[in-house]
Image (tube, rainbow, N blue to C red):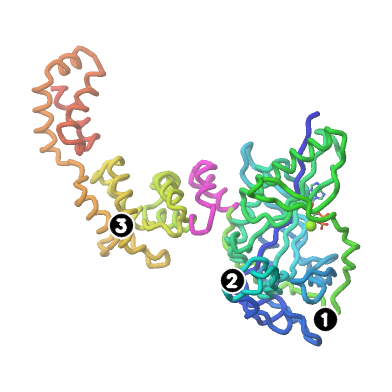
Amino acid sequence: MDWETVIGIETHAQLSTVSKIFSGAATRFGAAPNVQACAVDIALPGVLPVLNKGAVERAVRFGLAVGADINRRSVFARKNYFYPDLPKGYQISQYELPVVRGGSLSMLVKDGEKTVRLTRAHLEEDAGKSLHEAAGNAHSALSHGMSGIDLNRAGTPLLEIVTEPDMRSAEEAVAYAKTLHALVRWIGICDGNMQEGSFRCDANVSVRPRGSAVLGTRCEIKNLNSFRFLEEAINYEVRRQIELLEDGGTVAQETRLYDPDRRETRSMRSKEEAHDYRYFPDPDLLPLDISAETIEQIRSELPELPQAKRERYQNDFGLSAYDAGVLTQSRENAEYFEDMVNRLGRPAVKACANWITVELAAAVNRAGIEIAQSPVSSEQLAWLIVRIDDGTISSRAAKDVFQALWQRENIAVAVLSAPRPSLHSSVKSAARDDIDNIIEQLGLKQISDTGALEDVIVQVLAANQKSVEEYRAGKEKAFNALVGQAMKATKGKGNPALINGILKKILAR
Ligand code: ADP
Ligand code: MG
């Protein structure tokens, strides 16, 4: 039997507000337990929630960025369930009327462009955390078989983003998650820190015979906080479901957890239905009304989005889909690239893209950092290209300069927002001095002095009469041998274009 995988993803993105969604307590990560939980967060009787405007604005920004409808009126609902880290006994969420409806996200996958439709995005509060392990002596009780409750996270604003069941492989699911992750950071609504739980995915997975129009029964794998776990969990789950079905069994709709150590998913609980939660509109909160002006204001403040930028780089700059993809992986990547292009001009676009996607990307990957933290600034890299262009160094030597620059941690990183003088103006430039000093120190300067090269070449020709005769007899290969000898005589520093020209001129005499 040929099986088809079907995946829908629910993502919880923690919104980057300073305070919580319904209280004034701080949302900063890593504080000592319960120091950032106020009366509202710990659900003291008689307290009332007050909605955080910043959370609403971020939700609207997201909706506009994915081309969704913004509901001018949405409603907060109580989702009732008991959990030790949920002191109210219910979570404030949105149910029938979410703030964002529809929209879509497009991404590059192996076979081209894939579009995933979004169902909705709604605002809700996070729960607290149960602590089962002793974390230092502050929680000594935990080392005696007890659990602790930390309510610092309770009330942290979340945007839950839900897709239609549009993905057909773990690869597509990961591409979607990465694209969404890049987008929420791009528009500044979420810091995207997956280790701290700021961005976590639930994967709903089912299989069906290929060609079937009905969906199979799904399992939901909760709280996947890395792209690798997302991929592994889905692949495991697909295999498990296919084996079950091929053995004549049925898939039970349930919630499962992924165990990265054992690389398998495990049943957590049978799946509850929406009616189990007894949703009803929260009487403590008025419906959320968002004015058309507010929406237009937020729209006008949106930056150019990654997809638009990616298309512009391909169409206007003639870059490959791959290069355009790397350069728009984050806003910082795009800023780095655009800063170089602003300095060097349009003719240098390809060179800028190449240096970023090849040399810089490799160095950044090796160091496990982002381009934004690169010790080589966009201004320095631009100067490096200038020095190749004006014949000071060869492209080969430029790689050595780049490596030397990368390793010199004391070189100040140019601030991207600093004024950008044109490269050819006489303005003093620390970045240019950095490049020129390294070229000098490493002795990489090309010999571009025609007179000096002519002297060398005359000697080379005298010492290689055989090659000269072969060349004159029509053997093209002999010419390359002479270029090679001339390069050798200049210890690799002769400007190859000049050597070529001079050789041709002398041999034509
Ligand atoms: P709930 O809110 O109970 O988790 P929803 O019906 O809202 O359930 O669906 C949640 C997610 O599961 C959505 O992303 C949806 O696309 C996905 N989904 C629903 N049915 C299936 C299925 N049969 N296979 C895979 N994904 C599914
Ligand atoms: Mg769900």
| Residue 477 x %, y % | 26, 18
Residue linked to disc 3: 408
Q: CA distance from mark 1 to mark 2?
A: 28 Å
The percent coordinates of residue 259 (x first, y second) are 68, 51
User: Which label sits in the foreground, 3 or 2?
Assistant: 2
In which quadrant will I find the C terminus? top left
Inspect the image, locate mark 1, and give the three-letter code of the amino acid beneath it.
Answer: Asp
- The verdict on residue 313 being magenta is yes
Count the marks: how many? 3
- The secondary element bearing badge 1 is classed as loop
**Quarter where residue 132 is shown:** bottom right
Dot 1 corresponds to which residue? Answer: 284
> Around disc 2, counting alpha carbons within 10 Å, would you say few (fewer than 14), some (14 to 19), or many (20 or more)?
few
Disc 3 beta carbon < 8 A from ligand 1?
no
Circles 3 and 1 in contact, beta carbons < 8 Å: no
Lower position in the chain sequence, tag 3 or tag 2: 2
Q: Is residue 12 left or right of residue 479?
A: right
Please state the extent of the stretch shown in magenta in the rendering: 307-333
Foreground pick, 490 / 226? 226
- Asked if one can make out residue 459 in the rendered structure from this viewpoint, the answer is yes
Magenta stretch, overall SS: helix
The quarter of the picture where the N terminus appears is top right
Residue 29 bears which disc, if any? 2
Q: Amino acid at mark 2?
A: Phe
Q: Residue shown at 53%/52% (left/top)? A: 328
Specify which label sits upstream in the sequence, 1 or 2.
2
Q: Quadrant of residue 459?
A: top left
Is 366 rendered above or below residue 504?
below
Residue 466: % across, % down: 14, 15
At label 3, the amino acid type is Arg
Residue at 57% x, 63% y: name it: 303
